[in-house]
Image (spheres, rainbow, N blue to C red):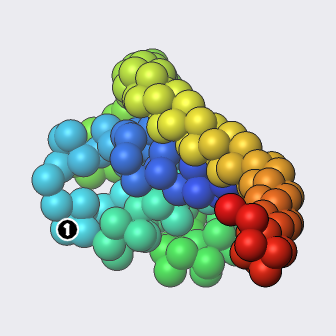
Amino acid sequence: NKLFQAAFSAAKRVRTETQIGANAVSIASAAIALARRVYSDLAARRALLIGAGEMIGLTARHLAAQGVRHMVIANRSLPRAQRLAAEVKAYAVGLEDIGAELTQVYLFSIDDLQQVVDENRQQREAAAGGAKLVIAEEVARFLAELRAKDAGPAIRALRAQADVIRLQTVEQARRMLATGRS
């Protein structure tokens, strides 16, 4: 139990005292970071997402969290696009209708996204050094507490033994005083 508490404490310190979690490394979060580089206010923008799979779904949820109110989900299967669109309050179209949605387009390629992911991964690796220091401090603190806890019974036994010796010495001194010996 103490070990788990110490591990959770160390994890909390790593999260709050380092930048290890500051830069996401998923493609979806990289897309949002890249869009923020181009547009300062994402909430005022429209987003066209092509596909309705897991990655597009995650990207759509990230965009919704950023306040983007006008999103279009285009997919080969209109019912699948509609399911995702309903989840994120977007509009769904089939791929055949995508042309009408392509006005003032800024296209991010997978290479753009990979570059953001790589940059974020490098920043996380740099933050890992700080995380290692925090973990080392927490391990040292835990081991010191463990050693102190292990020393407790020995200290109590020494105190009890000292009390016995003290009582024996006091009793011996009383006997000596009673017999007139000094």
Of residues 152 and 42, which is closer to you in this image? Answer: 152
- Does 82 sit above or below residue 73? below
Q: Amino acid at mark 1?
A: Ala
Point 53% across, 56% down: residue = 12
> Pointer 1: what residue?
44
Relative image position of residue 6 (x, y in whole percent):
67, 54
The extreme left residue here reads 40
The structure residue drawn at horizontal position 63% and vertical position 43%, both measured from the top left corner, is 144
Toward the front, the furthest residue is 180
Q: Residue at x 74, y 72 (%)?
A: 180
105 left or right, relative to 150: left
Quarter containing the N terminus? bottom right
**Taking 33 as reference, is 136 above or below it?**
above
* Residue at image coords 82%, 60%: 165
Q: Considering only vertical position in the picture, is 123 above or below 168? A: above
In this rendering, would 167 be left or right of 90?
Answer: right
Is disc 1 surrounded by few (<14), some (14 to 19) or many (20+) residues within 10 Å? few
Is residue 62 visible to the viewer in this orientation of the structure? yes
Q: Position of residue 129 (x, y in %)?
A: 45, 23
Residue 119 placement (x, y as % from top left): 38, 22
Q: Quadrant of residue 20?
A: top left
Would you say residue 79 is visible in this rendering?
no
Could you tell me how many numbered marks the image carries? 1
Task: Give the vertical position of 46 relative to 54 (above or below).
Answer: below
